[in-house]
Image: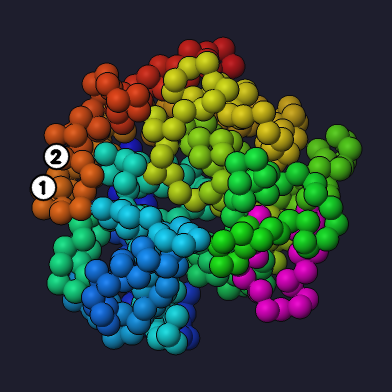
């Protein structure tokens, strides 16, 4: 487990780096290795046309986090023109005020070149996580379990010469993500990618329950630029691909097939094994803002090469003790055999785990997570490696919500006094709880 940095770095092939609009798969793989190197803190700077403070002021006054044409520097490499914006919610009237805004860069927004084959990077502010580690640790666990999931790494970010502080870079889920995972053969990266964009707590739109046989049944109007519900993020302008026929067919089968039809046919339509691996990590590490909890933070990708949908998780900074599971009797989270955190229907979990063979496989994966990355000694080794990267930068961060002392308490196994569990406190308690629950399974 101490070799995880090597494992994550070696998940992709190594070769030459470059840029431009036309690039090889190898260039993209090399670019991902360069940007999402978990053994270092990258140095990143944006140069904005009117100043970062003006950008923030415009968002606060309008509620619209608009792109600006900004210069970009990554270590000693630079691009003169990129799309740069705050990653903040669209608001009616005025925007939220933050100490540190999450950020988003789109290298193609102003028709510029890709950065080493990469189109976009998300910079997460970790505002809810005093450890500054949960996003990265969860990514490590997913990748170690062979789940298609975004890569992550730290960056120290500046804007117009001023320090913004420590961020977590998160790989965006898009066509480049699909290409890096599935390659170029048989148009594997050309499929439909659907993103869950929740509507409201009462009308989420992302549960994957059957709503009807038309595209409009899965889309809702909201303040987000592309609307809410299950949003198509690729092939939007292709009239053959953008009619939601593939998603509707899948949801029809998921919800309406008989038990025997479902057991016999789901694997032809959905990557069940990858989903079971994700569930094991999500339950063990307390992902209560994803599909099991608030029914949020995921994508569905339809692979043309296999004709299967794949579940791709996203956004785990509130995992591992920061968000409770409402239906759980234990503060660390749900029991593996009843993993859902609310009474809402979740057919992707309900129907798959109702198949005895899948439940057995899933519980085996939970045991694997418990025996490896959730084992306190192994997790502490990961935490120590990340802490060595950031501990000296934390006092220099002018926009961090947490002091160094609060951060160090937040990664410890000490009993929390805030209601949220400290990182290693959660790991030790969750590990003990799951060992007890899985005994004899």
Q: In this rendering, does residue 165 appear at all?
A: yes
Please, is residue 404 above or below residue 123 in the view? above
Q: Quadrant of residue 380?
A: top left
Q: Residue placed at 71% from the left, 35% from the top?
A: 345
Quarter of the image where the N terminus is located = top left
Mark 2 — residue?
404
Left/right of residue 141 with respect to residue 147 in the rendered view:
left
Q: In this rendering, does residue 281 appear at all?
A: no
Measured as percent of width and height from the top left, residue 324 is found at 47, 28
Q: Quadrant of residue 33?
A: bottom left
Q: Is residue 247 magenta?
A: yes
Q: Is residue 412 magenta?
A: no
Q: Residues within 10 Å of mark 2 (few under 14, many from 20)?
A: some
Contact? badges 2 and 1 (CB < 8 Å): yes
Q: Residue placed at 14% from the left, 72% from the top?
A: 161
Magenta-colored span: 229-250
């Amino acid at each position: 487990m101490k070799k995880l940095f090597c494992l994550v770095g070696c998940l992709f092939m190594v070769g030459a780096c470059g840029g431009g609009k036309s690039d090889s798969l190898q260039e993209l793989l090399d670019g991902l290795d360069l940007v999402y190197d978990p053994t270092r803190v990258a140095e990143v700077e944006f140069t904005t046309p009117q100043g970062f403070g003006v950008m923030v002021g415009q968002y606060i006054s309008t509620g619209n986090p608009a792109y600006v044409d900004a210069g970009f520097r990554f270590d000693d490499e630079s691009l003169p023109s990129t799309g740069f914006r705050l990653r903040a919610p669209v608001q009616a009237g005025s925007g939220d005020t933050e100490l540190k805004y999450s950020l988003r860069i789109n290298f193609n927004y102003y028709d510029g070149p890709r950065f080493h084959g990469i189109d976009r990077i998300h910079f997460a502010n970790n505002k809810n996580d005093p450890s500054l580690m949960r996003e990265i640790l969860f990514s490590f666990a997913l990748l170690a379990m062979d789940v298609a999931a975004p890569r992550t790494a730290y960056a120290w970010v500046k804007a117009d010469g001023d320090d913004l502080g420590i961020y977590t870079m998160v790989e965006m889920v898009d066509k480049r993500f699909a290409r890096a995972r599935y390659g170029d053969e048989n148009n594997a990266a050309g499929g439909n990618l659907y993103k869950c964009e929740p509507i409201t707590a009462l009308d989420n739109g992302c549960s994957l329950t059957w709503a009807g046989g038309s595209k409009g049944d899965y889309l809702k109007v909201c303040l987000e630029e592309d609307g809410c519900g299950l949003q198509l993020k690729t092939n939007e302008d292709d009239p053959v691909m953008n009619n939601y026929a593939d998603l509707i067919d899948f949801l029809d089968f998921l919800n309406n097939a008989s038990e025997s039809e479902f057991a016999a046919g789901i694997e032809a339509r959905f990557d069940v094994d990858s989903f079971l691996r994700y569930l094991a990590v999500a339950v063990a590490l307390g992902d209560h803002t994803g599909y099991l909890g608030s029914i949020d933070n995921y994508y569905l990708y339809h692979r043309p090469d296999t004709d299967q949908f794949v579940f791709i998780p996203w956004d785990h900074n509130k995992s591992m003790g920061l968000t409770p599971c409402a239906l759980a009797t234990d503060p660390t989270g749900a029991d593996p055999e009843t993993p859902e955190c609310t009474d809402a229907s979740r057919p992707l979990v309900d129907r798959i785990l109702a198949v005895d063979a899948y439940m057995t496989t899933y519980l085996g994966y939970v045991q694997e997570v418990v025996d490896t990355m959730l084992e306190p000694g192994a997790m502490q080794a990961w935490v120590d490696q990340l802490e060595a990267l950031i501990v000296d930068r934390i006092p220099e961060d002018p926009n961090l919500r947490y002091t160094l002392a609060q951060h160090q308490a937040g990664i410890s196994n000490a009993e929390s006094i805030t209601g949220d569990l400290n990182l290693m406190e959660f790991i030790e308690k969750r590990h003990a709880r799951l060992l007890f629950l899985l005994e004899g399974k």
